[in-house]
Image (spheres, rainbow, N blue to C red):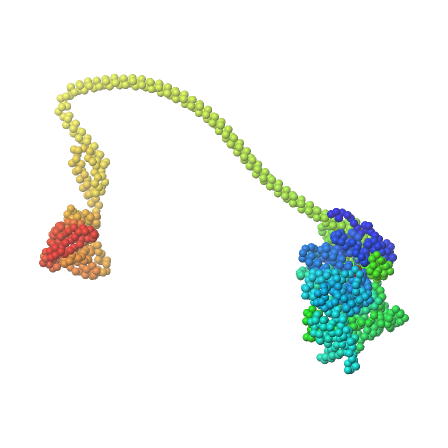
């Protein structure tokens, strides 16, 4: 916060002017003086609007510390003194916040500080963007790709000890929050000629020296290298060591960086093997050997080196040896092999070394890209950083310089396109008043080089592809013909011979007037370098290597993939890749860093005015300032502008209804922005001064804060209010509940107190009342008692008096009665003695009888004949009367009972009566039979189909049908028989079949005998001589003896009018055929129940054991 309050500005403590736009007066001198003044005060950065001019200080300045990073972080571009960090911050924030892809274009001559600037930009972005383990690893990999590429792609030149010998464009990719995701590096044309030859005072690529100085003995031995630089032909000796450069330390840095970037150990090993092989290739030497045909043939001088190379790379020695001696040309299925002379052999060797190295470099870039590429597929924001080799003018300039300078022309072109031309054209398009500013447009030079028909590159290609002998000279001739009239092309031999007498221009050269100055190119080597040929024998030899990396570097060596078409030339390849780059840059928002070299000596504190002046001129910086000053610093379409600032004015906030332009007008009027500060274009608003924009931005920021505060305020207010209301509501609820509770409590307390008081009062009152009542009662009681006593006394007195009176009256009456009695008795004595005694007796008797009968009437027993109750007699003299009365009553109630009978019941009772007369008190079995009803037909013959025959045989009414045991006369055993009694007969039938066994007419039955005991044994005696009696009398045993005997008796009586003799005796005789057998009843065991067991004892005796 404290930092925020310090309102610093570009204008504070300014040395000279920080922004050239503010320079007054504006001319070349003041421009340079301003730069110089600032440079002398260690201010190496100066702005032209948003472009940063950077002057190489050639010494380390304390302005890149982490504190500085923090200082510039999230600050407005113009807020602090000019710095590369301000530009980086601006670019990063507009990438992150406004979603605009950015590119940082760093231009300048070789040694002007481009590479350093690009590293500063990257390190700043790395410092301010997201943090976290994953992000940090991405950052680290991105940053560490630099030392690796520098080791392989940078070299010491006369201009720069660490000159980039390749072009590099790096896209850093970010996610939506601005965290780095990864990156993609594109490399442009490595200056590979340096591998085999370096200009005076320059070195080969750093990596060679680094290996030899930094690798351990062991590692060197593995690579078959020696530490001594002078052992190697490819290493320029005059500047092998560079002041202030520690190759050994750098080697360690590089290896470490390789590890961080993600190279595997075996990959690193392979890379260094290739580097060693390249270095050793330089040591292969050839000697001529005469051949029969008179031509020289090259032979390898010392095969030791070749052997070691082959061991290192796993190539068959003979194959490589042959590839250095022969060349096979394939044309239309014909193979022609020609020998190489020494010069050709050297050419082949160098071509191989250059190819090996440059392909290794491209492979490295691809490999690094693999490591650093973004893992996710989400939409990415991109920040491109372009660090391409700077404009170069050497003593001897060759194809490489031509290409490098062409690239710089293109960059200048895009700068012009985007800043000068585009800006002016936009003003015209938008209808803004504008005075045209002259500037040099280098499109014409670009056209000279890249025109598809007449461009130098096109002609070079044409030459290279042309059949016949092609040399650099024929190429120059062609140039002289075609480009002679071009303003920027100079040559001694050109048609218009403008330069015929220009001795500074040798015949073998041509000169181009680049935007940055004239450069003279040696034509020698152009054709070769453009062709970039490697003999097929060599590429095939490489492909055959067992070293996988080398094999991969030469895919065209695969015989299966032979391609007779020529590969594209180096020039056309480069042209194409530059075109792609330009297209890519045009899609992004450009940020410029223009690097300026203060002197040629790489010296600190030295400011060479002329050198700087030259750079300023060709960079067109002055025109840049002019355009800036004449123009507008900022423009924006109306809609986004209104959208961005509408909160600054009441009319436009929150919604503006109407055209956006009108809205912006209203807005600017309201804000009272001076009229000269802005212009209205057709579709855009133009703001002249950055300050105005910053003012707007500040106002906006302030307003946003206010709005945020307002929203916050309203929200907080609302929140507090709702909370308050809720609390209030709750409080009321709680209070009401509490009050209710308190009142309840209070009420209960009052109530209970009232009750207590009440109860006390009531108690007191009650007691008082009770006392009174008690008093009253006592009084009453006392009165009553007194009264009672009094009444008692009175009553007793009265009673006494009455008793006295009564006694006296009684006495009088008694006396009177006695007297009267005496008188009467004296009178009637004579009458009374004759009749009175009898009459009194009779009267009393009458009275007693009357009373007896009346009482009997009430005490009558029930009408049941079996009721034995009878009241006790009251007087002894009534005994016989009482018994008689009982008998009469019994007879009467029996009659009453009988009168209810139906005829059938009558019949049953008649039978029962008969049985009683026959057996009562004679046979022990009788009492048990009284209760049993006589059913007669126990067997229902008519209903049982089994006995149908039997039923048919008997047509009379059946009186008895019952199963009886017939006793065998011979042995006394029992057998079941159906016993039927009809009106006239007794029938015996088999129980099972129902067949009639015997039939006895009733007239033949003479007697029935039975014991007096409790058994069902009986004998039926038959008339002697009758048909049925042939076998003798029948012996039976039956459960219904009494009934059977009774019915037999009654039926016989009604049929024959004779009483059947029934003998009841414990010993009787029966007739069996001729024998008279005595049936004797003895006491038997109880085990067979009531059933008697018979035993024929002998001819005369049958014993029946009865229970
Ligand atoms: N900002 C700087 N601070 C200190 N030294 C610098 C700075 N920029 C460049 N240099 C010095 O200048 C040398 C050349 O810079 P470099 O970026 O390699 O030039 P270029 O890439 O333009 O050829 C560096 O090696 C370094 O010593
Ligand atoms: Mg560089």
Q: Is residue 639 visible?
A: no
Q: Most extreme residue toward the bottom, as rendered? A: 292
With 131 as the anchor, is 35 left or right in this view? right
* Foreground pick, 34 / 733: 34
Number of on-image labels: 0
Q: Most extreme residue toward the right, as rendered? A: 501
**Ligand 1 visible in quadrant:** bottom right
Q: Is residue 947 visible?
A: yes
With 189 as the anchor, is 1055 left or right in this view? left
Q: Position of residue 934 (x, y in %)?
A: 20, 51
Residue pictured at 56% horizontal, 35% vertical: 742
With respect to residue 166, does 6 lie above or below?
Answer: above
Q: Position of residue 128 (x, y in %)?
A: 72, 54
* Foreground pick, 359 / 888: 359
With 717 as the anchor, is 297 left or right in this view? right
With respect to residue 345, does 20 lie above or below?
Answer: above
With respect to residue 724, does 1059 lie above or below?
Answer: below
With 910 as the anchor, is 622 left or right in this view? right
Where is residue 599, by image quadrant? bottom right
Q: Position of residue 942 (x, y in %)?
A: 22, 58
Residue pictured at 64% horizontal, 44% vertical: 722
* Foreground pick, 288 / 90: 288
Q: Position of residue 605 (x, y in %)?
A: 84, 56
Residue pictured at 70% horizontal, 58% vertical: 139
């Amino acid at each position: 916060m404290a930092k925020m309050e310090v309102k610093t500005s570009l204008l504070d403590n300014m040395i000279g002017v920080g922004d050239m736009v503010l320079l007054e007066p504006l001319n070349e001198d003041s421009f340079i003086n301003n730069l110089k003044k600032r440079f002398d005060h260690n201010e190496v950065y100066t702005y032209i609007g948003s472009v940063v001019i950077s002057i190489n200080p050639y010494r380390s300045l304390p302005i890149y510390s982490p504190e500085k990073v923090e200082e510039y972080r999230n600050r407005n571009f113009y807020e602090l003194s000019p710095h590369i960090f301000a530009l980086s911050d601006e670019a990063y924030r507009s990438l992150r916040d406004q979603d605009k892809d950015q590119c940082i274009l760093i231009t300048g001559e070789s040694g002007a500080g481009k590479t350093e600037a690009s590293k500063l930009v990257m390190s700043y972005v790395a410092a301010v963007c997201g943090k976290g383990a994953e992000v940090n690893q991405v950052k680290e990999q991105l940053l560490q790709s630099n030392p690796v590429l520098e080791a392989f792609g940078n070299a010491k030149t006369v201009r720069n000890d660490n000159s980039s010998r390749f072009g590099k464009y790096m896209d850093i990719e970010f996610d939506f929050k601005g965290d780095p995701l990864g990156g993609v590096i594109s490399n442009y044309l490595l200056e590979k000629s340096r591998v085999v030859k370096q200009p005076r005072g320059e070195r080969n690529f750093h990596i060679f020296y680094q290996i030899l100085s930094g690798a351990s003995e062991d590692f060197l031995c593995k690579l078959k290298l020696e530490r001594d630089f002078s052992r190697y032909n490819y290493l320029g000796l005059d500047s092998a060591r560079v002041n202030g450069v520690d190759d050994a330390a750098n080697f360690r840095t590089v290896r470490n960086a390789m590890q961080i970037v993600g190279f595997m150990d075996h990959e690193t090993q392979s890379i260094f093997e290739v580097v060693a092989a390249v270095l050793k290739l330089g040591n292969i030497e050839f000697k001529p050997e005469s051949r029969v045909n008179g031509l020289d043939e090259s032979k390898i001088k010392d095969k030791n080196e070749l052997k070691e190379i082959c061991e290192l790379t796993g190539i068959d020695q003979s194959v490589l040896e042959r590839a250095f001696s022969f060349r096979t040309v394939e044309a239309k299925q014909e193979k022609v092999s020609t020998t190489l002379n020494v010069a050709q052999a050297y050419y082949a060797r160098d071509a191989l070394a250059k190819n090996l190295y440059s392909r290794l470099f491209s492979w490295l870039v691809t490999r690094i890209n693999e490591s650093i590429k973004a893992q996710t597929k989400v939409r990415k924001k991109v920040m491109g950083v372009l660090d391409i080799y700077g404009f170069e003018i050497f003593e001897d300039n060759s194809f490489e310089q031509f290409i490098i300078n062409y690239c710089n022309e293109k960059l200048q072109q895009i700068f012009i396109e985007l800043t000068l031309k585009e800006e002016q054209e936009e003003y015209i398009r938008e209808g803004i008043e504008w005075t045209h500013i002259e500037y040099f447009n280098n499109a014409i030079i670009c056209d000279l080089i890249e025109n598809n028909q007449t461009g130098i590159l096109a002609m070079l290609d044409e030459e290279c592809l042309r059949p016949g002998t092609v040399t650099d000279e024929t190429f120059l001739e062609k140039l002289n013909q075609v480009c002679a009239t071009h303003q920027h092309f100079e040559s001694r031999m050109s048609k218009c011979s403008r330069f015929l007498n220009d001795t500074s221009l040798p015949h073998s050269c041509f000169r181009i007037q680049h935007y940055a100055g004239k450069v003279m190119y040696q034509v020698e080597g152009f054709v070769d370098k453009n062709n970039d040929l490697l003999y097929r024998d060599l590429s095939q030899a490489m492909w055959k290597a067992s070293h996988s990396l080398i094999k991969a570097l030469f895919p065209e060596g695969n015989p299966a993939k032979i391609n007779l078409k020529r590969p594209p030339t180096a020039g056309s390849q480069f042209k194409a890749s530059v075109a792609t780059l330009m297209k890519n840059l045009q899609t992004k928002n450009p940020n410029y860093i223009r690097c300026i070299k203060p002197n040629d000596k790489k010296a600190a504190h030295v400011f060479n005015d002329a050198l700087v002046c030259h750079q300023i001129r060709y960079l067109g910086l002055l025109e840049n300032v002019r355009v800036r000053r004449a123009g507008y610093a900022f423009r924006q379409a109306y809609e986004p502008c209104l959208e961005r600032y509408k909160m600054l004015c009441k009319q436009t906030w929150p919604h503006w209804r109407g055209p956006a332009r009108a809205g912006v007008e209203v807005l600017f009027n309201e804000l009272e922005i001076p009229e000269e500060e802005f212009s209205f274009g057709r579709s855009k608003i133009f703001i002249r001064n950055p300050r105005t924009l910053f003012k707007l931005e500040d106002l906006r920021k302030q307003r946003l804060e206010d709005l945020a505060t307002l929203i916050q305020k309203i929200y907080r207010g609302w929140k507090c209010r709702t909370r308050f209301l809720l609390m209030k509501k709750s409080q009321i609820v709680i209070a009401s509940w509490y009050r209710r509770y308190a009142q309840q409590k209070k009420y209960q307390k009052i109530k209970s107190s009232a009750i207590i008081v009440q109860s006390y009062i009531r108690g007191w009152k009650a007691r008082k009342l009770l006392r009174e009542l008690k008093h009253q009662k006592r009084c009453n009681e006392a009165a009553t008692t007194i009264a009672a006593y009094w009444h008692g006394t009175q009553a007793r007195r009265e009673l006494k008096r009455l008793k006295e009176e009564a006694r006296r009256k009684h006495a009088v009456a008694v006396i009177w009665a006695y007297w009267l009695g005496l008188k009467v008795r004296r009178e009637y004595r004579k009458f009374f003695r004759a009749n009175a005694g009898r009459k009194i007796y009779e009267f009393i008797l009458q009275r007693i009888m009357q009373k007896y009968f009346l009482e009997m009437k009430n005490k009558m027993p029930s009408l049941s004949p079996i009721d034995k109750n009878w009241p006790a007699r009251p007087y002894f003299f009534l005994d016989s009367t009482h018994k008689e009365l009982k008998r009469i009553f019994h007879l009467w109630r029996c009659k009453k009972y009988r009168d209810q009978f139906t005829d059938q019941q009558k019949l049953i009772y008649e039978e029962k009566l008969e049985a009683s007369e026959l057996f009562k008190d004679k046979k022990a079995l009788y009492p048990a039979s009284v209760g049993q009803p006589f059913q007669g037909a126990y067997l229902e013959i008519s209903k049982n189909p089994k006995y149908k025959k039997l039923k048919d045989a008997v047509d009379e009414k059946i009186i008895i049908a019952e199963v009886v045991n017939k006793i065998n006369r011979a042995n006394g055993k029992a057998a079941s028989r159906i016993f039927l009694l009809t009106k006239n007969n007794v029938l015996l039938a088999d129980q099972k079949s129902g067949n009639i066994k015997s039939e006895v007419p009733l007239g033949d039955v003479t007697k029935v005998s039975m014991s007096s005991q409790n058994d069902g044994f009986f004998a039926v005696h038959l008339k002697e001589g009758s048909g049925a009696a042939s076998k003798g009398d029948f012996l039976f045993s039956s459960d219904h003896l009494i009934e059977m005997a009774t019915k037999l008796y009654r039926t016989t009586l009604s049929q024959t009018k004779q009483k059947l003799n029934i003998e009841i005796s414990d010993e009787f005789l029966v007739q069996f055929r001729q024998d008279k057998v005595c049936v004797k009843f003895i006491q038997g065991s109880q085990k067979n129940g009531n059933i008697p067991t018979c035993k024929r004892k002998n001819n005369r005796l049958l014993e029946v054991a009865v229970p």
